[in-house]
Image (cartoon, rainbow, N blue to C red):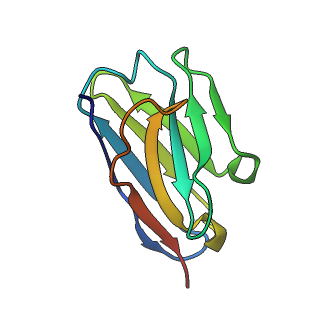
Amino acid sequence: QVQLVESGGGLVQPGGSLRLSCAASGNIVNRYTMAWYRQAPGEQREVVATIVTNGNVYYKDSVKGRFSIDKDGVQNTVYLQMNSLRPEDTAVYYCNTNPSLIPWGPGTQVTVSS
């Protein structure tokens, strides 16, 4: 069974940057549409960024121009570059296929605070 492990989160000041990584144990990155999701306390999990198998990318409106998703099919890893972070970006970030087909990984906590 494919497993997903997210990393790269942390505490950052507003305006700062982080780069998240998602390592998949199976060869799924080139076979499926992949996405980064996030879940803030008391909120539902939401899609933040999506990368299709052909490389097309899509973003939630509030992160357009600040976040960038990419992937490495050889390493079976998906990345999320997050710039100009805001307090409202604080959440646990997860990756999965889109729609989600794989058991969720542990996620990585991103906290944006001064």
Residue in the foreground of this view, choosing between 65 and 28: 28
Q: Which residue reaches farthest right?
A: 61
Q: Is residue 92 above or below residue 61?
A: below
Residue in the foreground of this view, choosing between 89 and 16: 89
x and y percent of residue 74 in the render?
A: 28, 22
x and y percent of residue 37 in the render?
A: 53, 47
Residue 45 appears in the rendering: yes
Q: Is residue 114 above or below residue 77?
A: below
Q: Is residue 30 above or below residue 19?
A: above
Residue 17 appears in the rendering: no
Residue in the foreground of this view, choosing between 50 and 39: 39
Query: Residue 49's quadrant in the figure?
Result: top right
- Residue at position x 57%, y 42% from top? 68
- Residue at position x 56%, y 70% from top? 41
Query: Residue 90's quadrant in the figure?
Result: bottom right
x and y percent of residue 93 in the render?
A: 47, 55
- Residue at position x 31%, y 28% from top? 76
Q: Which residue reaches farthest bottom?
A: 114
Left or right of 33, for residue 78: left
x and y percent of residue 29 in the render?
A: 39, 24
Q: Quadrant of the N terminus?
A: top left
